[in-house]
Amino acid sequence: MSAMLSARADDLSWQLIQPGTQFVSIAVKGPSDQSNRLYVVRIDPAHAKLTVALASETKTTARTAAEWCRASSLAVAINLGMFQNDGQANVGYLRHGSHVNNPRWNDYNSVLALNPSSPSDPRVLWLDHDQTNDVQQLARYEIVVQNLRLIAKDRRNVWAKSDRRWSEAAVAIDSQGRLLFLFTRAPYPMREFDDLLLKLPLAIVAAMHVEGGPEASLSIHAAGIDLDLAGSYETGFWPNDSNQKQWPIPNVLGVVREK
């Protein structure tokens, strides 16, 4: 393991954004051995309010992650998932309360559920869709989203080797039930990116892909941080590093800003 990956979790320089929400930028080895930074926001759902903002629900057009932060009073925002050609519907199942953005389940195998109606349920529920038929419990959650799986809940990298690579926005869960928002502008093949996540001192248990290429986004606007990250490279779509601005996206996962 390289020196850049040898730190313990307690050694990472986490910056408090607001109660239950921390941020760190980690120096890591990028593709082709160049240096890179992985941006991580860690959210404890016992102390921070997680929510989503959906263009289909607010009846607005797509916005950048930065614009969603301003419009929806979010301290942090990341892509909620890839979206369909209509520019609004998530590729996998997506529901927020009674609003159903996409009613159809597909073969994507990561499912995230947030904000249960009962305090006896875990605040964050993460399922491998191919490992359980018990989806009825999802009805007890305010937010349910299905996305492409990166890492299965047994910490198993499910991606095969490939030459395809892209800037990446991902969401993960750690061993303490905290959510991690992850962003890298440097384009990794996903098997290599998953291996990186599993080696880092983040205690990641499972992870899902929420967007790649120039649409991959992460914004932080709280505690004096004004950071708007945008991806660029994506094999077969945007095969260069020229994009410098966030693209409008219809759906984001975010942390409600403390007043």
Image (cartoon, rainbow, N blue to C red):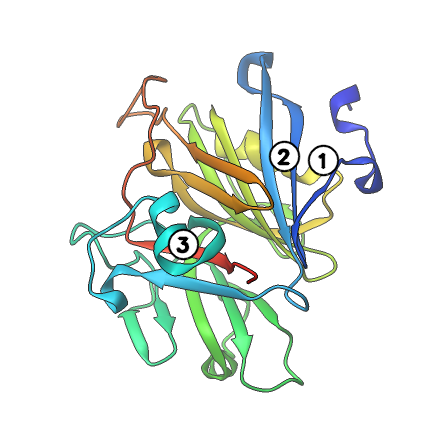
Q: Residue at x 76, y 39 (%)?
A: 201
Q: Which residue bears the numbered disc 1? A: 199
Work out whether residue 103 can be spotted.
Answer: no
| Residue contact between numbered discs 1 and 3, judged by CB atoms under 8 Å | no
Residue 145 vs residue 7: left or right? left
Work out whether residue 29 can be spotted.
Answer: yes
Compared to residue 59, the image places residue 139 above or below, namely below
How crowded is the residue under tag 2: few (<14 C-alpha within 10 Å), some, or many (20+)?
some
Front-most of 118 and 1? 118
Q: Which residue bears the numbered disc 2? A: 195
Q: Residue at x 42, y 27 (%)?
A: 165
Residue 241, position as x, y percentages in the image: 36, 18
Q: Closer to the camera: disc 1 or disc 3?
A: 3
Q: Residue at x 49, y 36 (%)?
A: 227
| Residue contact between numbered discs 1 and 2, judged by CB atoms under 8 Å | yes
In the displayed orientation, state which residue is furthest to the left.
Answer: 86
Q: Secondary structure at mark 3?
A: loop
Give the alpha-carbon distance from disc 1 to disc 2, as whole Å.
6 Å
Residue 125, position as x, y percentages in the image: 58, 69
Residue 180, position as x, y percentages in the image: 60, 50
